[in-house]
């Protein structure tokens, strides 16, 4: 996919972190970017900083996502690019004992479902709607569109407490190839990045000793990932027309231990 001001893109979770970095790199090429995020204050500020459009969106809501695509397309035209970064995490053991009474308790199912709703179903909802829209376009340089998803190394080495998060990201990894096959006849590509530990606002809020320990756990380079490095791979997946149906770890060779 050529990246220039004739192309429209949507970045979910674009108000912060990896999504913001991807949107920033897309804007640097001239691509017209719409940020879909549920955080209105941060989304408006991000859009102003990038010269992008912000649409308050909850990826778990069919009506919200439907309205967001309509709003973005009314201003920027039909998107040829979708980058999915909206995501949430939690940490709860499948079953554990109450610290004071020793009584067994289990992962609250509503909390499990919430992570799946955002990370897996929210991602698929945006993919499905973007792909249907891209199908209305004539191919450009042989392709109609390109999609990048964000999973996590937790899809392969989820840690203690990450059953829901790992399941959601494993789902994103698992659906990448079948979606690529579904969309092949329409000349739409899809790929997924599995980030290791990146220096996003979530990580920046951790105490320094914990950040230092996390950095030391990365074989090389021994530091947290820079969101610009995530954006660089996302743009390569968009640009490179032979990149399709693939899931790539971007992690400095880290393999997450149980905890
Ligand atoms: N930072 C890391 O180390 C890391 C590692 C692996 C995977 N990831 C994944 O990368 C993605 C981005 O993470 P980040 O670190 O940039 O986090 P972040 O919290 O900085 O950004 C996530 C964004 O998603 C938005 N969001 C959450 N729920 C939403 C919803 N229902 N609808 C719309 N927007 C919603 C948030 O408002 C936020 O702006 C996530 O999917 C995360 O799981 C991050």
Image (spheres, helix red, strand yellow):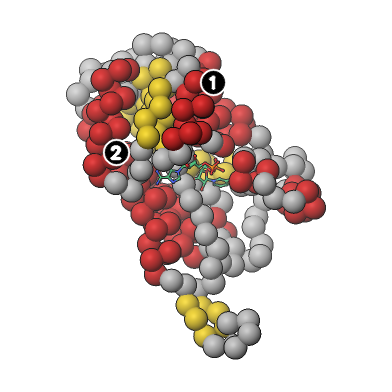
As displayed, is residue 222 above or below residue 170?
A: above
Residue 143 horizontal side relative to residue 17, left or right: left
Q: Position of residue 145 (x, y in %)?
A: 33, 26
Q: Residue at x 48, y 51 (%)?
A: 88
- N-terminal of the pair, mark 1 or mark 2, is 1
Is 122 left or right of 166, judged from the image as shown?
Answer: left
Q: Is residue 46 visible?
A: yes
* Location of residue 123 (image quadrant): top left
Q: Which mark is residue 49?
A: 1
Q: Residue at x 24, y 36 (%)?
A: 66
Residue 32 horizontal/vertical position (percent): 40, 17
Q: Closest to the observer: 188 or 242?
A: 188
Does the Cβ of the disc 1 residue fall within 8 Å of ligand 1?
no
Rendered residue at 37%/16% (across/down)? 7
Q: Looking at the image, which is closer to me, 193 or 160?
A: 160
Residue 130: x percent and y percent? 29, 33
| Quadrant of the snapshot with the N terminus | top left
Q: Is residue 116 above or below residue 127?
A: below
240 relative to 128 in the view: left or right: right
Q: Residue 141, relative to residue 97: is it above or below?
A: above
Q: Nearer the viewer, mark 1 or mark 2?
A: 1
Q: Is ligand 1 closer than 8 angstroms to the Cβ of mark 2?
A: no
SS at badge 2? helix
- Rendered view: 74 above or below 180: above
């Amino acid at each position: 996919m050529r990246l220039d001001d004739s192309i429209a893109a949507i970045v979910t979770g674009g108000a912060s972190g990896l999504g913001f970095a991807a949107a920033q790199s897309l804007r640097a090429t001239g691509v017209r970017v719409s940020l879909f995020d549920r955080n209105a204050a941060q989304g408006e500020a991000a859009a102003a900083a990038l010269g992008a459009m912000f649409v308050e969106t909850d990826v778990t809501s069919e009506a919200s996502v439907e309205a967001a695509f309509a709003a973005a397309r009314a201003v920027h035209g039909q998107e040829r690019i979708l980058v999915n970064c909206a995501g949430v995490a939690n940490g709860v053991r499948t079953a554990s004992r109450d610290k004071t009474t020793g009584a067994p308790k289990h992962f609250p199912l509503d909390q499990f479902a919430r992570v799946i709703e955002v990370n897996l179903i929210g991602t698929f909802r945006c993919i499905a709607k973007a792909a249907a829209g891209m199908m209305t376009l004539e191919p450009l340089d042989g392709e109609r569109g390109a999609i990048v998803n964000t999973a996590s190394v937790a899809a392969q080495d989820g840690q203690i407490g990450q059953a829901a998060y790992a399941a959601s990201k494993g789902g994103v990894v698992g659906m990448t190839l079948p979606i690529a096959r579904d969309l092949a006849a329409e000349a739409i590509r899809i790929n997924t990045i599995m980030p290791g530990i990146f220096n996003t606002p979530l990580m920046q809020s951790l105490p320094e000793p914990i950040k230092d320990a996390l950095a030391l756990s990365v074989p090389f380079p021994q530091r947290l990932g820079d969101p610009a490095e995530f954006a660089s791979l996302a743009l390569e997946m968009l640009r490179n027309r032979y990149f399709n149906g693939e899931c790539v770890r971007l992690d400095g060779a880290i393999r997450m231990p149980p905890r």
